Amino acid sequence: MAPELGQYALVLAIIVATVQAIVPQVGAYRRDAAWMGVAPAAARVQFLLVLFAFGCLMVSFISSDFSVVNVFENSHSLKPLIYKISGVWGNHEGSLLLWILILTLFGAAVAQFGQNLPPTLQARVLSVQAMIGVGFLAFILFTSNPFSRLDPAPFEGNGLNPLLQDPALAIHPPFLYLGYVGLSVAFSFAVAALIEGRVDPAWARWVRPWTLAAWCCLTAGIALGSYWAYYELGWGGWWFWDPVENASFMPWLAATALLHSSIVVEKRDALKSWTVLLAILAFSLSLLGTFIVRSGVLNSVHAFASDPTRGVFILAFLVFVVGGSLTLYAIRAPSLKGGGLFRPVSREGTLVLNNLLLSTACFTVLLGTLYPLFLDAVASEKVSVGPPYFNAVFVPLMTPLVAALAIGPMLAWKRGDLAGVLGRLKFVAALAFLTALAVAWYAWDIMPLAVLGLALVVWLGLGVFREWAERVRLFRWDIVDSWRRARGLPRASYGMSIAHLGVALMVLGITASETWQDEKQLIMRPGDVETISDFELTFIGAEKVPGPNYSATAATFVVTRNGQPVTILQPESRIFPNPPMETTEAAIRSTLAGDLYTVVGEGDGLGGHAVRLYYKPLVIWIWLGSLAMMVGGMISLSDRRHRIGAPSRKQAAEPGTKNRDPGALAAAGAGD
Amino acid sequence: MKPKRQRLVIVVTGLVFIGAAIGFALFALNEELDVFRSPTQVAEDGFPADKRFRVGGLVEDGSVSSKGIVTTFRVTDGAHSLTISYDKILPDLFREGQGIVAMGVLNTGGTFEAQEVLAKHDENYMPPEVADALKKSGHFKPQGGDS
């Protein structure tokens, strides 16, 4: 019963979406309040219908209703409950349904929180949002129905890929999709603004929270995925520049650029057409990512649910969305009047630099991802583009970005004083230089890049504190006054500092773990002792142990340091019967100082086991850094100006009126 | 600066930037690209020693032997085969008859020294290059799956 109801709800949803796409758009054109009023109601109804359909699919999964093809193919009655639930989106059809659910969730959220928007803008945003919805609902109904039945119903399901039976991966897709699809709101706002022919600071201020929310989720999703790859795949790596990873990284780069350029629109009324273009591109890259992953066009190591025949539909939809929005952009963008002027050396200038570097980085990832496809299509040459390419292009692009990150927030709007800022950063620069010397002394022969990496970490990390100290006039005023100022700084300012600090932490984690990693792969017999970093690992032995839906070979290592017991590590190699497959469960001792990472492989039949041992110093900071970036984004999102004092167009059109205390906030004024 | 002039400066800087980046990226692509060769292609045309490339095929039955951590095996596309040695732990799905792709260099003795061996996380999977190579040599048998 549930599958039919779910199917029915989806059909109703596409009808509602069609109405929502057309009626408010016409209403906005005719300034007809009643017609425009359809949009918020339709958006809520559409969300509830899709939510209902999603619930129906979930019921089928939980009750292991194997008469549904999707459940049969991706579930198994012996699976733990959480993986029955995550199985809902661990496959093509279900993940698309999740995509649409989140799309309509954002539509409903715009209806709910966007009540202070001008009615025509809100109507148009929701209409564009519904157009995307129609496209995806049609896709799911015509090519990927999650509710198809099987007759006769089998007794048992095929099971979910065991690699996906993992808590981090259970919540990874929802976060990733919240990010991907959240960018649809920025896209809808951009297209609506193009239709209206108006982009102003108020527009940027409405778009910003949505972009920020999407960016936070995308950051969390990517970080979770990377952490999962780190501990689950058992290769000790955390980023493989795999096309599927790139598919999520490209929208992230574009969204990061958008986040920063919309500040310029909000504060200075400049870079408007660029920001609109970025909003369109960011969502287009999300769609491209969906296409890459869902069509199986790249057949990468990570594509778990792919079907090339469906690719044509997404490709057509992609061409329609990107082509349509870019055509609209070409027609309307010239009429967007540029506002504030600025010198190259200014806050705006560094934000432009940020945008140039991020979009170039995004482009190089796109190139590296699509080039093998292109070459295969035109020259039938099978090639692969691996980490060496991406490392070669990323280091030169990210170095100036991180270097400028310490300077940008300290520059004034319009016309900055670079010499003055550098003067205030001279201690930071001196410390960064000393770090470089120390690292060069210590690690030049291992990895010269470490010198650059760690110098940048010190430069940016201390630069962030220096900028904060500047704002609160630390040590220049009375400490009590500084404390008062520190409490008075807008949350967005703290959000920025924390997020930028996160970048420094991430660079620290990457540099240290790449430079000073200790790795050994060898055969160990019971009683063997191996030293890695300053730990001694004694291999006790390996034995067979049963698990809930697998059987495992569990090895035991006793870890000591200088003879003192540290911990016991028990990596496993698991064999799953449904579907038949082996996975590696690494045992990791994770500390802030570094991770001890052990993997056990197959036995050699003579009592020995192949093992892989790593020590990765500071590696955890890669994810703590991304966590800091996400937390920074969330703190910025909680800034009161995003919630209260809904900007009206007139007010916001006069920059400067909002700083009631110009003296105190002059430095903090643009705290993002 | 006039608005038009400012926009021009930004656009020109941007174009120069992106142009330089594309140039550099294409250069890096050229340097870092790893081409794929089937065992037949290696047997017939050879490949420069010490230049990295990828090779793939089915792991030949009975060809796997290990000495300590070093595993030696042969991959075949049905017509020809190539000896591969690998000094790390093989992926979980590595076994005889399985399609794999290895990345590494040919040493002067004609053995392929793999730096990385990939098998997909799926028992039905056949790497697309391997499927292609097998089709060309006429030994392609669709496996249980749909890949």
Image (tube, coloured by chain):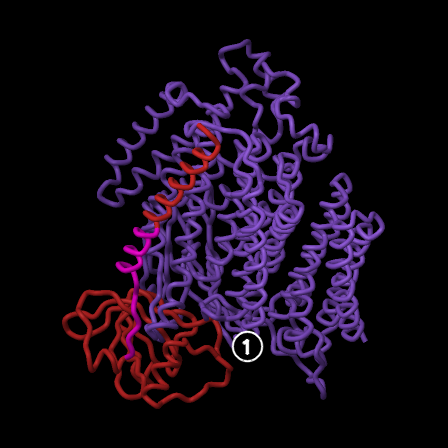
Q: Tell me the amino acid under the disc marked 1.
A: Thr
Up/down of A542 relative to A228, above or below: below
Q: In this view of the protein, which residue sits in the foreground, A100 or A507?
A: A100
Q: Name the residue beneath numbered marker 1.
A: A309
Colour representing chain B:
red
Give the percent coordinates (x, y) of residue A204.
62, 38
Chain of the residue under the numbered disc 1 shown in the image: A
Q: Is residue B68 magenta?
A: no
**Residue A649 x, y percent position in the rendering:** 70, 33
| Magenta segment includes B23 | yes
**Lateral position of residue A572 relative to residue A422, left or right:** right
From the rendered image, report the letter of the chain displayed in purple.
A
Q: Which residue is drawn at the image coordinates 74% and 59% (left, top)? A: A22
* Magenta segment boundaries in residue numbering: B22-38
The residue positioned farthest toward the top in the image shown: A478
**In the image, farthest residue toward the left:** B108
Of residues A227 and A42, the one drawn nearer to the viewer in this rendering: A42
Q: Which residue appears at 49% of the width and 25% of the height? A: A414
Q: Is mark 1 on a helix, strand or loop?
A: helix
Residue A268 is situated, as x and y percent measured from the top left of the image, at 56, 30
Q: Where is residue B78 in the image (x, y as percent from the top left)?
A: 31, 88
Callout 1 crowding tier (Cα within 10 Å): few <14, some 14–19, many ≥20: few
Q: Is residue A138 visible?
A: yes
Residue A320 to residue A623: above or below: below
